Amino acid sequence: MAIFNISNYKRRATRKKKALAAFMRKLGKSTRKGLQKIALETDKEVWKEVACLDCGNCCKQMTPTFSNKDIKRISAHFEMTPKEFHKKWLKKDSSKDIVNKQTPCQFLGKDLKCSIYAIRPQDCADFPHFTRSNFKYQVQEKTYINNIGYCPATLLFVEKLEAKLADLI
């Protein structure tokens, strides 16, 4: 399993984002059947090549959305009230989502490991959202294109989809 060189990945993501975005827009309009199955197969391929837990780029540059359930669980771990936890580390963003006050994430260690991995927010656990039940919705919502610049696995996922589907949609 390869560990991505972050600077090489960022250059590649920047260079390819426009073309991959065009492919994903086309895919979003496609009536091709079986896209969910292809996404699941591609997901398995990606994780054979990417060591997600050795990267930490998403934690350095993004913030998850915290649900009330996340806040209760994580604040209990720190023996804090949800209100104390929120005041110390969280804020509401312009969309009224509850997010970290800062990036990189306060729970990201110097070793690029999450210090609360076992109880991390559900948004973190689901990231990069490849296998959600409605792949087509994620394509139309631009989830993958938005994440290309943050996640080497997402870039590889979209590149692999393009290689498999470009001539079929």
Image (cartoon, rainbow, N blue to C red):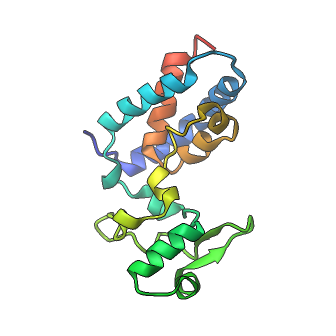
Q: Position of 65 compared to 78: left or right?
A: right
Residue at the extreme left: 1
Q: Position of 57 compared to 134: left or right?
A: left
Q: Nearer the viewer, residue 76 or 86?
A: 76
Q: Examine the image and state in which quarter residue 87 appears.
A: bottom right
Q: Nearer the viewer, residue 159 or 77?
A: 77
Give the residue at x 73% y 68%. Answer: 96
Give the residue at x 45% y 74%. Answer: 74
Q: How many marks?
A: 0
Quadrant occupied by the C terminus: top right
Give the residue at x 42% y 33%. Answer: 43
Q: Examine the image and state in which quarter residue 99 appears.
A: bottom right
Residue 139 placed where, x, y %? 64, 34
Give the residue at x 52% y 32%. Answer: 158
Q: Nearer the viewer, residue 13 or 29?
A: 29
Q: Examine the image and state in which quarter residue 115 appears.
A: bottom left
Residue 101 placed where, x, y %? 58, 76
Residue 45 placed where, x, y %? 36, 29
Q: Nearer the viewer, residue 122 or 12?
A: 122
Quadrant occupied by the N terminus: top left
User: In the rendered image of this protein, does residue 112 appear above or below residue 158?
Assistant: below
Q: Position of 154 compared to 91: left or right?
A: left
Residue 20 placed where, x, y %? 59, 31
User: In the rendered image of this protein, does residue 114 appear above or below residue 27?
Assistant: below
